[in-house]
Amino acid sequence: MGTPAKGVLLTGPPGIGKTTLVMRVLESLRASKPNLKVQGFYTREIRQGTERVGFEVVTLDGRRESLASTSVSAGTARWPSVGKYKVDVASFEFLALPELEVREGTELFIIDEVGRMELFSSSFFPAVLEVLKTNIPILATIPIPKFGRDIPEVARLRNHPGAEVYTLNSSNRDNIREQISTQLLNMLNIR
């Protein structure tokens, strides 16, 4: 078992800009270290006009698959649900799980997000735990506890000894971006 990961966890209410912040931090890191080897994925909303109709998972090299959709067809009827969304576990696993396998030279993992939809995959959280066993820094997003209750796996990450949790809100976004960028630069030994 390796040393606990150096982890930065970003939380906040839905729609506050966690994914946007993660991508801006990544841009900042790549500006300081253009050849930074990063693995992982982020989630992106799918919209039709002003209506959100689903989510997709996107790797850092641009490959994408469905994560969840409001469209229900014969094939999706048995998929697990989160609110109005049906979760496409198979597509998520196909794309996201290989991104959590440590490759030689990886310097940073991005995991956006560890939430209810992703946790329908029985293989996902064990893969996240394997990443935590490495000494590779992690930047991940987690949902804020709903009604004071945390998802058990999310609570486990939140309480991980190597994790520092930042709670994002509309008034602290810019300051947190700078703090996280600086912290990760230090973890990556980039000055």
Image (cartoon, rainbow, N blue to C red):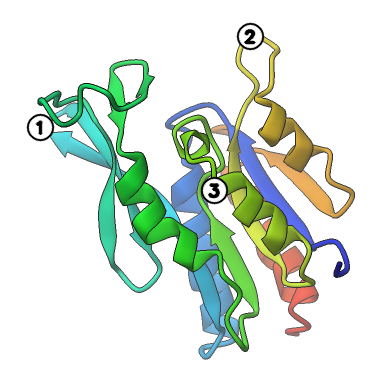
How many other residues sit within 10 Å of disc 3, few (<14), some (14-19) or many (≥20)? few
In the rendered image, residue 57, in percent from the top left (x then y), is placed at 35, 51
Asked if labels 3 and 2 touch by Cβ distance under 8 angstroms, the answer is no
* Kind of residue indicated by mark 3: Ser
* Kind of residue indicated by mark 2: Phe
| Closest to the observer, 125 or 36 | 125
| Residue at 58% from the left image edge and 75% from the top image edge | 29
* Residue of label 3: 123
Residue 189 in view in this figure: yes
Q: Is residue 48 above or below residue 78?
A: below
* Residue of label 1: 49
| Residue at 52% from the left image edge and 81% from the top image edge | 31
In the rendered image, residue 70, in percent from the top left (x then y), is placed at 20, 25
Dot label at residue 147: 2
Q: Earlier in the sequence, mark 2 or mark 3?
A: 3
Q: How many marks?
A: 3
| Closest to the observer, 142 or 10 | 142
Front tag of 3 and 1: 3
Q: Is residue 19 above or below residue 54?
A: below
| Residue at 54% from the left image edge and 33% from the top image edge | 170
- Res 73 → quadrant: top left
* Kind of residue indicated by mark 1: Gly
Q: Earlier in the sequence, mark 3 or mark 1?
A: 1
Please, what secondary structure does the residue beneath circle 3 have? loop
| Residue at 11% from the left image edge and 33% from the top image edge | 48
**Alpha-carbon span between mark 3 and mark 1:** 34 Å
